[in-house]
Image (spheres, helix red, strand yellow):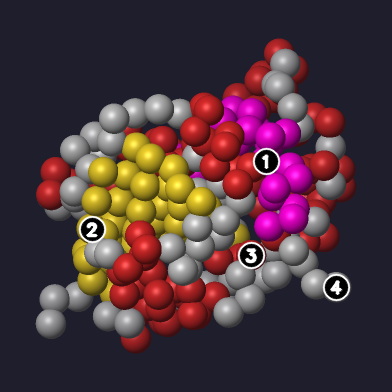
Amino acid sequence: MIINNKEIYDANWASWVDAKIYGPTGRWLRYLLSQLFTGIPEPQNIASILDFGCGEGTNTYFLAQCFPQARVTGLDFSQTGIDCARSQYQRDNLEFLVGGLDSPRLGGRHDLIACLEVLEHVGPWQDLLARLALAARQYLLLSFPTGRMRNYEKNVGHVRNFHQGQVENFLSGLGFQPLKIFYAGFPFYSPGYREWCNLINAAHHPLTRGKFGPLQHAASTILFILFKYFSTRDRGGDQFCGLFKKRVS
């Protein structure tokens, strides 16, 4: 079966906005990213950030808040995602554009390029990562799932999950070294939460779609607390988050 990610996300982003903002995995991912940022020695020197595959913009907005001195651009091939982002988030240092690897924005150079929950959707992921590495002046910020891929992940356009060390080894050959890396989430995110998501086909279940009510907010907060305080961060989990720095030649 050929997976059409553009078709999937054009059709669903408007229904997934609250899940990205308030859902436990989105909140937990942003918490993990905030912990990675402590590995940046002089964050005030980051002047330009590109978030490639920004979707509906919540993580891009978070980057713009964390780096208020930087010009932050969210880039995505889904017009629906960009429309959601523009309607939801406005900041003086933030913009959202429709585009992919052929975008002129990738022709420039950015101090930090983020690619969050994207690589698992891409067939030739090495080509994409090599292109992003070429456009990154200092840092690459990545997140993606590892371990066993469940059926529900295929339903949201995943074509793979990664193995530990797979991306780090590839980036080493491109001149990037890890500053800080997490393999996070055992046991509450994985296997617990991922198995539950697989059981209910989470992304297409009424509990995760549309506007969140009190039940969804309460459940999301409980799960976020379990992920944050009672799950591994540095090893044993299936959620990868990594900050890489370009080696000085």
Q: Which residue matches tag 3?
A: 121
Q: Residues within 10 Å of mark 2 (few under 14, many from 20)?
A: some
User: Which residue is drawn at the image coordinates 82% and 51% (left, top)?
Assistant: 198
Mark 1 is on which residue type?
A: Trp
Residue 111: which numbered mark, if any? 2
The numbered mark at residue 167 is none
Q: Would you say the residues marked 3 and 1 are in contact, meaning their CB atoms lie under 8 Å apart?
A: no
Q: Upstream in the sequence, badge 1 or badge 4?
A: 4
What's the residue type where badge 2 is placed? Answer: Asp
Query: Quick one: label 2 or label 4, which is nearer the N terminus?
Result: 4
Q: Label 4, on which residue?
A: 1
User: Amino acid under label 4?
Assistant: Met
Front-most of residues 124 and 177: 124
For the record, the magenta segment spans 6-30
- The residue lying at 52 percent from left, 27 percent from top is 88
Q: Secondary structure at mark 2?
A: strand
Type of amino acid at the residue the image marks with label 3: His
Q: Check if residue 1 falls in the magenta segment.
A: no
Circle 1 sits on which residue? 13
Q: Residue 99 in the image: state x and y as whole percent.
A: 50, 57
Mark 4 or mark 3, which is nearer the start of the sequence? 4
- Please say if 139 is above or below 35: below
